[in-house]
Image (cartoon, helix red, strand yellow):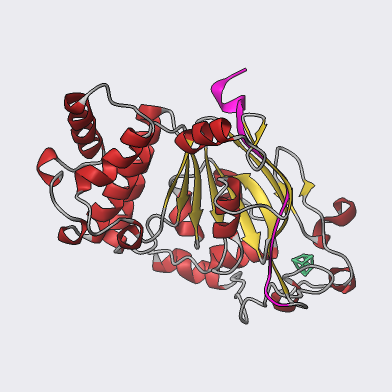
Amino acid sequence: MSEQDEVILSVSHLKKYFQLSRTEVLKAVDDVSFEIHKGETLGMVGESGCGKTTCGRTCIGLYQKTDGTVLYRGQDIHNLNKTEQFAFRKNAQMVFQDPFGSLDPRMTVADIIAEGIDIHHLAKDNKDRSEQIFRYLELVGLNREHANRFVHEFSGGQRQRIGIARALAVQPEFLVLDEPISALDVSIQAQIVNLLIELQQKMGLTYLFIAHDLSMVKHISDRVAVMYLGTLVELTTSEQLYADPKHPYTKALLSAIPIPDPDVEEARDAVRIPLEGEVPSPINPGEGCRFRKRCRFAKEACGKTMPPLKDLGNGHFVACHLYDNDDE
Ligand code: SF4
């Protein structure tokens, strides 16, 4: 079995509902299944409110699930005893979208990075602790002079580097990266993505990379999962998704990515699929396909039953009635 065949995370029929009132239930994640293999990056994309962050948080145990299972190396992460939970928290870390909000402004950078080292007793002594802090700072492109400074002294990109160093300091193997570049300037985004790729190669990390648009995940993902209103609508390799998207929602998301070549852009205008209307509410989404009110291909069946996620071959999964009975 090659490393890439080894399943690290197996998510099966996962549901996460929030009871808003006696009658209203927000179905943030509704029957989502996927696997992540060792050393791979699974990109998870969708507009805001589609449930991707809730899915990431439920996969790492920050939220209790409503139903379904999340297995981490075969262990049900929502059913761990205290010792197992402690080990899981070390192995699986989260990097948040807002590095400023997630880093304590009263702590020095050294203390932020050392927190996990201390909790998990990863340093032999104080010298080793300091060396580890410096090593993680250097790994993320900062230097030892930064150790005694406070978070407000850093730029957005540097703060995200600190957030990544904090996550790495417990020597995890799996990271949920929750829109780690969305809050950063475009010029800085590529630097952080390149850093994450470099760290993955150096440390054999596995990523769930959450983002709100497809252009961000293209460079980093091996496979991409597209979410719409709490459901997974397409899942395939990054290459396949960009070359031959199947779901109307994925096609619309791809149409929205600007291409800096006017000729290509003009040619694309002829086949562009506009994404119309607002994302409907995940509260009481009704029967049928959740994309039906924005889909120009909607047919009768789309209002009646939710299309299941179906394998079209070579691991290209799509949930859309256009592919019923192989009738493409
Ligand atoms: Fe459109 Fe129907 Fe496919 Fe939904 S199932 S994406 S409404 S064609």
Which quarter shows the N terminus?
top right
Nearest the eye: 317 or 99: 99
> Which residue is rendered at x = 33% and y = 57% of the image?
99
Considering every residue shown, the one lying at the far front of the view is 82
Q: Magenta part of the protein: which range?
A: 1-21
Q: Quadrant of ligand 1?
A: bottom right
Q: Is residue 3 above or below residue 63?
A: above
Q: Estimate the x, y position of residue 50 in percent, counting from the top left.
A: 61, 65
Can residue 206 be seen? no
Q: Is residue 148 above or below residue 83?
A: below
Whether the magenta-drawn stretch holds residue 17 is answered as: yes
Nearest the eye: 87 or 245: 87
> Which residue is rendered at x = 46% and y = 58% of the image?
215
Q: Name the side, left or right, on which 4 lies relative to 217.
A: right
Q: Is residue 17 above or below residue 1?
A: below
Q: Name the side, left or right, on which 147 lies relative to 224.
A: left
Can residue 205 be seen? yes
Considering every residue shown, the one lying at the far left of the view is 145
**Quadrant in the rendering for residue 26:** bottom right
Nearest the eye: 199 or 294: 199
Which quarter shows the C terminus?
bottom right
Nearest the eye: 40 or 130: 130
Q: Estimate the x, y position of residue 326 in percent, counting from the top left.
A: 86, 51
Q: Estimate the x, y position of residue 44 in percent, counting from the top left.
A: 56, 53
